[in-house]
Amino acid sequence: MNSKLLYNIAKSLLLARLRQTLVAALGVTFGITMFIALLSFMSGLNSTLDGLILNRTPHVRLFNEIKQNQDQPVLSAEEYKNSYNFIQSVKASSARQEIYNSSGINQFLQSDERVLGVAPRVNTQVFFNAGAIDITGMIHGMEVDAETRLFHFNDYVVEGSARDLRQVANSIILGKALAEIILANVGDVVQVTTAAGDRFSLKVVGFFQSGIQDYDKVQSYASVTTVQKLLGKPANYITELHVKLHDINSAPAVAQEYRTIFDASAEDVQTANSQFETGSFIRTLISYSVGITLLIVAGFGIYNILNMMIYEKMDAIAILKATGFSGSDVRRIFLMIALSIGFFGGLAGLFFGYVLSLLIDQIPFVTAALPTIKTYPVNYNPVFYFIAITFSLITTYLAGLFPARKASKVDPVVIIRGK
């Protein structure tokens, strides 16, 4: 039968029951709207929470791990060469903590096409002297430009500027919580004592806030040269190399490769932060489940409305079949009705979902735990909209398929005889 004629009939049936049609379309619209808004908000929240750790975590971390000494004297004795030797209380070796040939490794990493950038680190434990009390802390020596470009360090500096570490000699950026403990302000001079017992004066040029309170109570940052000076080490003294890759998913394989090439310890971001990936996956799964449930509920509404329409339009269906319309034509008419409800209801849902996401994005959200966030985070990923409209059409098609098949099997003789 002519497709245009079938379309006109489907349109007439839709308009004849306009109120029911609008109710069905509103069900789809509501489901799509909440699906978009919920998924956009949850995805934005996941990115923000993971960013607190993952943005500050290297994809691959190269360092020298403190290990037990494997070369015990008994193993060198000829008389015990073919024996099993059980040695207790083996202590760590006296190997240096710095990375061997750090400059050569750095050059190699910079030439690797998989590497986005490298940030050298010199880390050391110190005591912050607050009157008669010594507070344990950690100073991370870093190259400011590399840290800002690769790991967004400046985004977490809530007072002062990361550039001051490079411009002001013997300067330090304290964790916000640590500064509150030792009552330090920007411009003050704090006293630190190294593990070797040497005391130094450092000028506070800013405060750092990661959003993790326990982390901010002990962490502080200085330039690489400042920390090397604290330790009395030469300019080639580097304890860690933080590598950022173009593809974070390749981190485990790259870490294994670097571990073999450089004979150093290498830790990938997936191993270091596996719990965060698990939490993000669970939250995303919950968001998709709730959104899909809303669309399924809307599909049941369409199914019920089409079923009622068939019962009410038995006469019309019988007349159509009596005048030459086949069962497949009738099925196509009702599928057109279902898909029209799903399509136009879905388009409206995409629009209102986007508007609702914009409204959420404008709601103020200021908390000390998340210094980089000023409003509720929202992710406007086009994939969410594509999934929503696709699932809307699939749901409405399935909701209309069974009533359409039922309508196609109506016997016009039975209906007309009953009348």
Image (cartoon, rainbow, N blue to C red):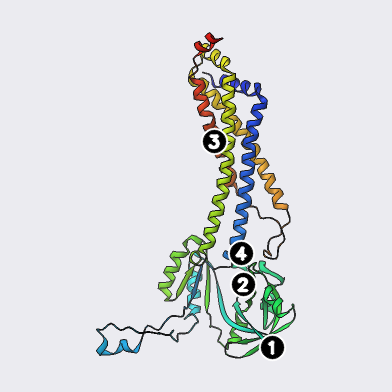
For marks 3 and 2 on the same chain, the one whose residue lies earlier in the sequence: 2
> Crowdedness of circle 2 by 10 Å Cα count: few (<14), some, many (20+)?
some
Q: Residue at x 60, y 77 (%)?
A: 140
Q: Is residue 380 visible?
A: no
For marks 4 and 2 on the same chain, the one whose residue lies earlier in the sequence: 4
Q: Which of the two marks, 2 or 1, is nearer to us in this view?
A: 1
Of the numbered discs in the image, which one, if any, rests on residue 37? none
Q: Nearer the viewer, residue 308 or 267?
A: 308
Task: Say which element carries label 4.
Answer: helix
- Residue named by callout 1: 132
For marks 2 and 1 on the same chain, the one whose residue lies earlier in the sequence: 1
Q: What is the three-letter code of the residue carrying label 1?
A: Ala
Q: Which of the two marks, 4 or 2, is nearer to us in this view?
A: 2
Residue 334 percent across, percent down from the top left: 55, 24
Q: CA distance from mark 1 to mark 4?
A: 34 Å
Q: Which of the two marks, 3 or 1, is nearer to us in this view?
A: 1
Residue 338 percent across, percent down from the top left: 57, 29
Q: Nearer the viewer, residue 323 or 20?
A: 20
Q: State the image quarter where residue 17 is shown.
A: top right
> Crowdedness of circle 3 by 10 Å Cα count: few (<14), some, many (20+)?
many
Of the numbered discs in the image, which one, if any, rests on residue 215? 2
Q: What is the three-letter code of the residue carrying label 3?
A: Thr
Q: Residue at x 66, y 55 (%)?
A: 377
- Residue named by callout 4: 52
Given contact means CB atoms under 8 Å apart, are the residues at marks 1 and 4 in contact? no
